[in-house]
Amino acid sequence: MAALFTLVGQLRLVGLALVVMGGVHVVLPRLIGWPRDLAGTSLLTRQVSYAHLFFIGLTCVLLGLLPLALAPDLLAGTRLGSALLLGQTLFWGLRWAFQFTVFPARLWRGDRLRAAAHIGLAVLWTWVTAVFGYALAITM
C-alpha cells in the first residue's frame, strides 16, 4: 500500500487512470447523447466525429500504458524519459486548461451529473498534470 504513495506508484496509478479513461470512450457517445445529437448531421460529420473519438480514446490508452509499464524508466533521468515526461505534462496540462476554458459553466451548471463530471475531471486532470510535472521536475 505504501508503494502507491511513491512517485513510481503515482505514475502507475495515473497510467491506469488514463487507460480506464481511454476505455470509457467506448461508451462515451451514449453517455453524452451523441447518437441523437449527430443524427441530423451528414454521414461524413458523424464518421469524422466517431473516428476522432476512437483516436482520442486510443491516445489515452497509449499515453497511460507508458507510465503504467515504464514508470521507473521515465524517472531514470535520461533525455528520452525527460522528453516523454515533458510531453505528458504539456499535453495533460493543456487538457486541464481546456476543462476551464472550453467547457463553460453553462454546460454543466444545474445538471448534477454534468457538474459532478466537470468537478471529477478537473480533479483528475489536476492530479495527472501534477504527477507528470513533479516527475519531470525531479528528473531534470
Image: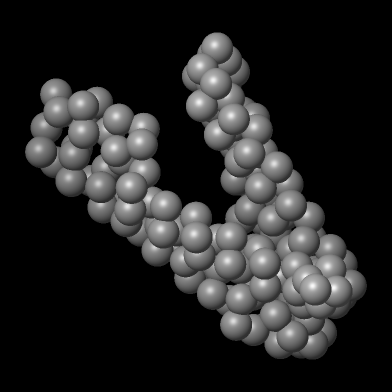
Q: Residue at x 56, y 34 (%)?
A: 117
In the drawing, does residue 132 fall left or right of residue 120?
right
Image spot of residue 81 (x, y percent):
71, 81
Q: Residue 34 lies in what quarter of the image?
A: top left
Q: Residue at x 19, y 37 (%)?
A: 45
Residue 42 seen by the camera = yes
Residue 79 seen by the camera = no
Image spot of residue 128 (x, y percent):
69, 56
Q: Residue 86 lies in what quarter of the image?
A: bottom right
In the drawing, does residue 122 fall left or right of residue 131?
left
Judging depth in this view, the residue of 39 and 94 nearest the camera is 39
Asked if 48 appears above or below 91 in the picture, the reply is above
Judging depth in this view, the residue of 119 and 66 nearest the camera is 119
Judging depth in this view, the residue of 30 and 48 nearest the camera is 30
Q: Residue at x 61, y 76 (%)?
A: 68
Colour pattern of the rendering: one colour
| Rendered-image quadrant of the N terminus | bottom right
Image spot of residue 76 (x, y percent):
79, 87
| Rendered-image quadrant of the C terminus | bottom right
Q: Residue furthest front?
A: 1
Asked if 113 appears above or below 121 in the picture, the reply is above
Q: Residue at x 66, y 63 (%)?
A: 14
Asked if 74 appears above or below 26 in the picture, the reply is below
